[in-house]
Amino acid sequence: MVSTMTFTLTIGDESFELIVVVKQTVGSDFNTAPLEVSAPIGYDGPINSNAFRDEVENYYREHVGERGRVLNIDPSATATRLINCRVDSEKVVQLPDES
Protein backbone atom coordinates (compact mmCIF):
# COMPACT_ATOMS: atom_id res chain seq x y z
CA MET A 1 0.00 0.00 0.00
CA VAL A 2 1.25 3.47 -0.82
CA SER A 3 -0.01 6.46 1.15
CA THR A 4 0.76 10.13 0.62
CA MET A 5 0.71 12.37 3.66
CA THR A 6 0.73 16.16 3.52
CA PHE A 7 1.76 18.27 6.45
CA THR A 8 3.10 21.62 7.58
CA LEU A 9 6.60 21.81 9.04
CA THR A 10 7.23 24.94 11.10
CA ILE A 11 10.74 25.99 12.02
CA GLY A 12 10.91 29.29 13.85
CA ASP A 13 8.78 31.72 11.85
CA GLU A 14 8.96 29.72 8.60
CA SER A 15 6.38 27.15 7.49
CA PHE A 16 6.78 24.58 4.73
CA GLU A 17 3.93 22.63 3.10
CA LEU A 18 5.43 19.17 2.61
CA ILE A 19 4.62 15.67 1.39
CA VAL A 20 5.86 12.31 2.62
CA VAL A 21 5.24 8.94 0.96
CA VAL A 22 4.63 5.89 3.15
CA LYS A 23 4.89 2.42 1.63
CA GLN A 24 3.89 -0.90 3.11
CA THR A 25 4.61 -4.14 1.28
CA VAL A 26 1.51 -5.70 -0.26
CA GLY A 27 0.41 -8.72 1.76
CA SER A 28 2.47 -7.76 4.81
CA ASP A 29 1.08 -7.50 8.33
CA PHE A 30 -0.49 -4.04 8.76
CA ASN A 31 0.48 -3.91 12.41
CA THR A 32 4.06 -5.14 12.48
CA ALA A 33 5.57 -4.91 8.99
CA PRO A 34 8.11 -2.12 8.63
CA LEU A 35 7.04 0.98 6.75
CA GLU A 36 9.16 2.72 4.16
CA VAL A 37 8.96 6.46 4.87
CA SER A 38 10.35 8.92 2.33
CA ALA A 39 12.25 12.04 3.25
CA PRO A 40 9.96 15.07 3.37
CA ILE A 41 9.39 16.33 -0.18
CA GLY A 42 9.68 20.10 -0.34
CA TYR A 43 12.25 20.60 2.40
CA ASP A 44 15.98 20.02 2.17
CA GLY A 45 17.11 21.45 5.49
CA PRO A 46 18.31 19.56 8.56
CA ILE A 47 15.86 17.19 10.23
CA ASN A 48 16.21 14.39 12.76
CA SER A 49 15.45 11.58 10.29
CA ASN A 50 14.90 8.84 12.87
CA ALA A 51 12.54 10.93 14.99
CA PHE A 52 10.70 12.11 11.87
CA ARG A 53 10.28 8.55 10.60
CA ASP A 54 9.02 7.38 14.01
CA GLU A 55 6.43 10.17 14.16
CA VAL A 56 5.21 9.45 10.62
CA GLU A 57 4.88 5.75 11.42
CA ASN A 58 3.02 6.46 14.68
CA TYR A 59 0.62 8.80 12.88
CA TYR A 60 0.03 6.24 10.12
CA ARG A 61 -0.60 3.38 12.54
CA GLU A 62 -2.98 5.55 14.61
CA HIS A 63 -5.19 5.68 11.51
CA VAL A 64 -4.62 2.36 9.71
CA GLY A 65 -4.24 -1.10 11.24
CA GLU A 66 -5.24 -2.91 14.40
CA ARG A 67 -5.22 0.30 16.45
CA GLY A 68 -6.45 2.44 13.55
CA ARG A 69 -9.09 5.02 14.37
CA VAL A 70 -10.08 5.45 10.72
CA LEU A 71 -9.43 2.04 9.23
CA ASN A 72 -9.35 -0.63 11.90
CA ILE A 73 -7.96 -3.82 10.34
CA ASP A 74 -8.30 -7.09 12.18
CA PRO A 75 -4.93 -8.81 12.74
CA SER A 76 -6.22 -11.90 10.91
CA ALA A 77 -7.05 -9.92 7.73
CA THR A 78 -5.11 -11.13 4.72
CA ALA A 79 -6.33 -8.82 1.96
CA THR A 80 -7.47 -5.22 2.13
CA ARG A 81 -7.74 -2.85 -0.80
CA LEU A 82 -8.28 0.88 -0.56
CA ILE A 83 -8.66 3.23 -3.49
CA ASN A 84 -8.67 7.02 -3.25
CA CYS A 85 -9.28 7.24 0.48
CA ARG A 86 -8.62 10.54 2.22
CA VAL A 87 -8.19 11.12 5.93
CA ASP A 88 -7.87 14.58 7.47
CA SER A 89 -6.47 14.61 10.96
CA GLU A 90 -4.35 17.11 12.84
CA LYS A 91 -1.47 16.17 15.09
CA VAL A 92 1.24 18.42 16.48
CA VAL A 93 4.63 16.97 17.38
CA GLN A 94 7.98 18.47 18.25
CA LEU A 95 11.06 16.73 16.91
CA PRO A 96 14.37 16.85 18.75
CA ASP A 97 17.24 18.63 17.04
CA GLU A 98 19.16 16.60 14.51
CA SER A 99 21.97 14.72 16.21
Image (cartoon, rainbow, N blue to C red):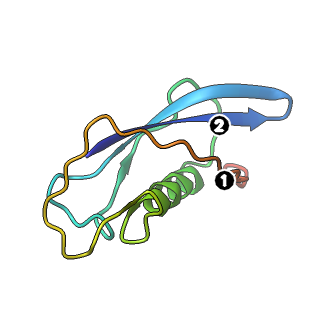
Tell me the residue at 31%/70% (across/down). 32
Residue 99 numbered mark, or none:
1
Would residue 24 be visible to someone looking at this image?
Answer: yes
Farthest bottom residue in view: 76
Residue 94: x percent and y percent?
73, 53
Above or below, 80 against 2 in this view is below
User: Would residue 44 be seen by someone viewing this image from the given angle?
Assistant: no
Q: Dot 1 surroundings within 10 Å: few (below 14), some, or many (20 or more)? A: few
- Residue at the location (64% across, 47% down)? 90
> Which one is earlier in the sequence, the residue at label 2 or at label 1?
2
Circle 2 is placed at which residue position?
46
Identify the amino acid type marked 2.
Pro
What residue is drawn where x is 30% and y is 66%? Answer: 73
Residue drawn at 16 percent across, 52 percent down: 26
The image quadrant that residue 80 belongs to is bottom left
Is label 1 in a helix, a strand or a loop? loop
Residue 96 falls in which quadrant of the image?
A: bottom right
In the image: residue 17, left or right of residue 70: right
Give SS at disc 2: loop
- Residue 33 pos. (x, y %): 28, 65
Residue 2 horizontal/vertical position (percent)? 29, 41
> Residue 5, labelled with which disc?
none
Determine whether, in the image, residue 76 is placed left or right of residue 68. Answer: left
Q: Amino acid at mark 1?
A: Ser
Sort mark 2 into few (<14), some (14-19) or many (20+) by Cα contacts within 10 Å: few
Q: Nearer the viewer, residue 76 or 59?
A: 76
Task: Return the x and y of residue 56 as percentages of the image width and height.
Answer: 51, 51
Front one among 14 and 48: 14
Report how far apart the C-alphas of labels 2 and 1 lie in the structure.
Answer: 10 Å
